[in-house]
Image (cartoon, rainbow, N blue to C red):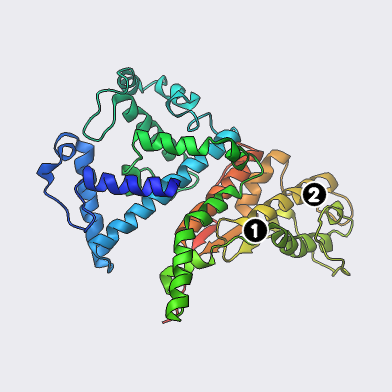
Amino acid sequence: NARALLETEASQQLEGIYGWLPDGRFADQSRYPALNKITEAAETRDRLENYAEEEKEAGLTSKDARLKLVRETSFTWLNRLVALRMMEERKIIKSTMSKLDKSNSFIFWLTADGNEEMFSLHQKGTLPHNEMSEGPSDVTYRKFILWQCNQLARDVSVLFDPSNLSSHLFPRPSILKDIVELMNRKELAEAWQTGNEETVGWVYQAFNAEELQAAFTAARLSKKKFEPKDIPSVTQLFTPRWVVKFLVENTLGRLWVEMHPDSRLKDQMDYLVPFNGLARTLKPAKGITFLDPSCGSMHFGLVAFDLLVEMYKEELEKVGQQGWPERPSVDSIEEIPTSIIANNIYGIDIDLRAVQLSALTLLLKARTLNKDCTFSDHNLACSNVEVI
């Protein structure tokens, strides 16, 4: 439902505000009041024309480029709103999204030094609407959300980039209200809570459901192989959690137990298969690397992260004992999330959007343990090797 709302909204903005019509043509700017009265809108129109031209050089028609942007905008804003809601629940950020302009973080931002102009504008209320269908207070809330995205872009660079075109197609007030009401439904409350970081992946899979069904239908009817553009949709399916745990515990977990036969973790791993341990060269916890070469939304990485946390803790407890390092990988439990992100978990995917969501998933996991931990998405890469 959220995807449908956001795609319709993006398409209507392109047509009604910026004059990019569904057939791919750009209408005369003089017919669109926002382009003549609001500098921001005129600049967005210029960027849209440049975008269409760049996509044309890449082989897309203007109509297809428009469809691509509509979908990317829907994807971007849906995942941003989900991320903000999940961060609220984990106290990583103050209330930002669930109460819209009544949220604490927005109120703090309005009254911060340097935002006097925004505060004054907000005081004017929701009317009158301008040529972009926003009232004065609506404009200030949009500016605030983009400011919040800019803060988060320091950690998850692509998804929250406030300068991209999708950011210029911010959902208007009525649509934003509808999306938040969908998210606030009681039956979804558990999805946003700590421990349910997989919600990011479930949203992603559901977002691709239409393309998945269409690709399989077309392949069945035409008897042809999937096209390259179909690969993300038809392969981005969740592995059942018990299978993930089985694989992670019998690789990463087994490696740890082989290095440390006296580890208490072997009794905590439900799916660890009994084995006669090999003699492993001792490594500190931060020296163990875990790569998911098809990371999706980092479903495997979430399980690995939890296991690595226990490894670091055990190393801190037993440091200096026989069979354990003389120095621990970290000096305190608070440093563990930063070290895992910097040293242990790596991911690769052919879909840039999946890489973005992997970064988001790991950010949620790390900041839940320590909201002040240092985070970087540098160990995640989008890479697609094509054989010609």
Q: Which residue carries the number 2 mark? A: 315
Q: Which residue appears at 31% of the width and 43% of the height?
A: 168
| Quarter containing the C terminus | bottom left
Viewer-closest of 231 and 111: 231
Q: Position of residue 18 (x, y in %)?
A: 21, 45
Query: In terms of sequence position, does the residue under pointer 1 or pointer 2 come before the other?
Result: 1
Viewer-closest of 225 and 251: 225
Q: Position of residue 74 (x, y in %)?
A: 39, 49
- Depth check, mark 1 against mark 2: the one in front is 1
Q: Residues within 10 Å of mark 2 (few under 14, many from 20)?
A: many
Q: Residues within 10 Å of mark 1 (few under 14, many from 20)?
A: many
Viewer-closest of 85 and 191: 191
Q: Which residue carries the number 1 mark? A: 300
Amino acid at pointer 1 = Phe
For mark 1, give the secondary structure: helix
Query: Farthest front residue?
Result: 221
Judge whether 382 appears above or below 29 on screen: below
Q: Position of residue 169 (x, y in %)?
A: 32, 44
Q: Which residue appears at 13% of the width and 37% of the height?
A: 36
Displayed quadrant of residue 49: bottom left
